[in-house]
Amino acid sequence: MLVVGLGNPGQRYADTRHNVGFRLIDLIAERWGRPVFREKFKGQYASVELAQPGGAARLTLLKPLTFMNLSGESVQPAMTFFKETPPSVLVVHDELDLPLGRLMLKQGGGSGGHNGLKSVSERLGTPNYTRLRLGIGRPPADFRGDVADFVLEGFPPHEQSTVDDLLARAADAVELLAQRGLEAAMNQVNRTKPSATAS
């Protein structure tokens, strides 16, 4: 499986809402042995293995460095190189249409206005890949700016614990997907609500 975290490169964007995909890749790498990331496919990639009954699950982690709007230029050559198919590509991304802290796993679908997903779908020639949607919520009523401004801002201090919990559960979801497959992972991930302490 190829696990792609969407985001923008550079310190300017590191902790923004748009970069939760990058942050999840870093968390998975930390959990699974801290592999060295290498530069290729217009991005950074590393391979990890998760021990499980019947053998290890091998995952390739990818952070496109193309900037969000051109993410597909990194995902498509990586998918081809590792001989994966679109259904075995998992794209992790921020999701405005889910409340902050909510997590959803799905197969296929539209881009929902997300330029990273739009680019990936265009370059793969299909929307039929797996998505892990990390809820960041929509701008509050008193937010000054548009949606683009909102996603390129960092999380305020009072949301940090919710974001940390979201990323931990997202990493669990990737492990579950690798171990038990999409249907079982969707059944568990999509019915699990954020904990009360993360609200």
Image (cartoon, grey):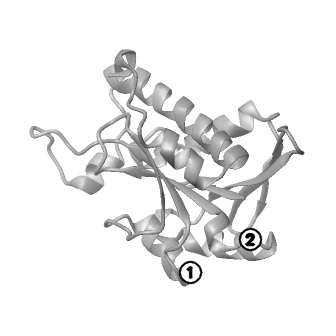
Quarter placement of the C terminus = top left
Residue drawn at point x = 43 percent, y = 43 percent: 190
Q: Nearer the viewer, residue 64 or 172?
A: 172
> Which percent across, then down, holds residue 43?
68, 61
Residue ID at (36%, 33%): 155
In which quadrant is the N terminus drawn?
A: bottom right
Residue 87, given in percent of the width and then of the height, sits at 62, 68
Which residue was labeled with disc 2?
84
Q: Position of residue 161 (x, y in %)?
A: 42, 21
Taking the image as shown, residue 139 lies to the left or right of residue 84, namely: left
| Residue 15 placement (x, y as % from top left) | 47, 38
Report if the CB atoms under discs 2 and 1 are less than 8 Å apart: no
Residue 10 visible in the current orientation? no
**In this orientation, which residue lies closer to the viewer: 82 or 22?**
82
**Kind of residue indicated by mark 1:** Arg
Which tag is nearer the camera, tag 2 or tag 1?
A: 2
Picture residue at 65% right of the left edge, 75% below the top: 76
Q: Amino acid at mark 2?
A: Glu
Q: How many marks?
A: 2
Instruction: Please tell me how crowded label 2 is: few (under 14), some (14-19), or many (20+) other residues with Cα within 10 Å.
Output: some
Q: Along the horizontal axis of the image, is 112 left or right of 180? A: left
**Mark seen at residue 4:** none
Q: Earlier in the sequence, mark 2 or mark 1?
A: 2
Q: Residue furthest left?
A: 142
As displayed, is residue 106 above or below residue 160? Answer: below
Is 98 left, or right, of 142 in this rendering? right
Kindly identify the residue that appears in the image at 38 percent across and 21 percent down. 198
Residue that carries the numbered disc 1 in the rendered image:
123
Q: On the picture, is 14 further left or further right than 35?
A: left
Q: Residue furthest bottom?
A: 125
Element marked by disc 1: helix
Badge 1: how crowded within 10 Å, few (<14), some, or many (20+)? some
